[in-house]
Amino acid sequence: MLYANSVFKDESKLDINYVPKALPHREKEYRLLMEFFNFLFQFSEKMSQRVIITGDVGTGKTALSNRFGADITLQANKKKIKLKYIHVNCREYRGKISLILQHILTIFQANFPKRGYSSEEVLDMLFQILDEEATHIILALDEFDTLIKNEGSETVYKLTRLQEMRSNKPQRISLLFILRDLALINDLDESSKSTLQRNIVNLKKYDINQLVDILNERVDMSFNLYAVNDDVINSIAEFGYSESGNARFAIDLLWRAGKYADANNKRVVGMECLREAVSSIFPSIRKSEIDSLTLHEKLFLLAIARFFNYNDVACASISEIEESYEIVCEEYSEKPNSHTQIWKYVQLLSALGIIKIKVRSASKRGRSTFISLPTIPSNELEKELNASLRKKVSEKHEI
Ligand SMILES: Nc1ncnc2c1ncn2[C@@H]1O[C@H](COP(=O)(O)OP(=O)(O)OP(=O)(O)O)[C@@H](O)[C@H]1O
Ligand SMILES: [Mg+2]
């Protein structure tokens, strides 16, 4: 790509999916991971491993796991050890183990039918393929929080016992569980808990200086020489730090500031560009999260956003949101879904971390459920949903 009159020399290095060759300030954690999986180089069929990577949003869990996965695969393959690293984001599969297993199988067998097999059968087929190919896989289950919330204890238990269930056979699957909220492990059964708590790689929040280092490295890769002022880098690091040490937030802000510099025909990214970037940013929700919702999940979330936009209260009861949902449905000429379905939307949005559920005792009628929207400005959410819904409607018309 040509970058005439741009502050960028290679924007792709700021892309969320880009995995840098080395991760500054995660060297210790990287070595620990390598240590946990060292057995693969000696007796990959006799052992398997289960490791947790945990840390707050944007602390480098996904990046570290991907870096480690790519490096260990390369090292193993050089030594003629058959190893494959598979990274699956559980949220993309709605935390459903059946969909996740199906997806993994299609990596080995592209035309595997999507329906008609139970999770157990799919798993058996996967083991069969791995046996035939004499391959070990490291399966990274990213955003595992969603799976725990959706599937509960029993599935997690089965996952931690995958190998024991096929005693005396070669070990084929190691697991890397990636999750933000380690407390979720506490609610599991004792056995899963003790297995999972053995190997934990904990990523602490980045401090300002660490974020400056991370940003400087990205600036060198992606911007022209002297195109970003030091003041800007330091301020971005401060923003990242106040957003709970979130490197993603910082890198995204850096990219946006660069975009504003280009849009204003500036040769240097200065503070004014950063201010423009800050005012445009929408940090608490990922657009991809909204886009991946179904039509009625969006309508229901829009009902929540509307409610909090018009009512200056912390919580809403389900029936209040249901009323708002009916009005939204009318507006979009859609038939509102049943109470049971609504309950599923509430569970899903809570599992995605968009809303929070609280169960409280409400007067004489016993306990009832309340919904809150703790981190996302309802105004912004409403705008975002309207845009996404408009897109859907116009797509419908185009077809
Ligand atoms: N130490 C680091 N060096 C360079 N880049 C980093 C480092 N840590 C994180 N990043 C970058 O910051 C961004 C966010 O990191 P990542 O996606 O791994 O966070 P995460 O912990 O998985 O967040 P989430 O909980 O939201 O999934 C990515 O672009 C990643 O490449
Ligand atoms: Mg991640």
Image: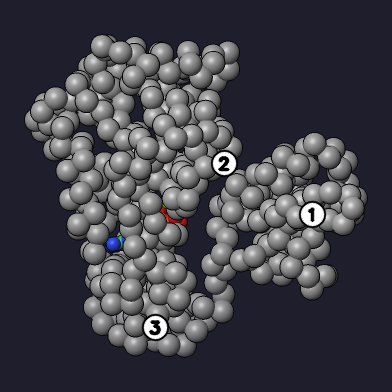
Vertical placement of 37 versus 54: above or below? above
Q: Percent position (x, y) of residue 115?
A: 58, 17
Q: Earlier in the sequence, mark 1 or mark 3?
A: 3
Q: Disc 3 on helix, strand or loop? A: helix
Q: Is residue 192 left or right of residue 50?
A: right
* Mark number displayed over residue 235: 3
Kind of residue sitting beneath label 3? Ser
Q: Is residue 396 left or right of residue 284?
A: right
For the residue carrying disc 1, how many other residues have a C-alpha within 10 Å: few (<14), some (14-19), or many (20+)? Answer: few
Q: Nearer the viewer, mark 3 or mark 2?
A: 2
* Mark number displayed over residue 361: 1
Q: Nearer the viewer, mark 1 or mark 3?
A: 1
Q: Earlier in the sequence, mark 3 or mark 2?
A: 2
Q: Disc 2 on helix, strand or loop? A: helix
Kindly identify the residue that appears in the image at 35 percent across and 35 percent down.
195
Kind of residue sitting beneath label 1? Ser
Residue tagged 2: 149
Q: Quadrant of residue 127?
A: top left
In this view, the residue in front, 168 or 28, is 168
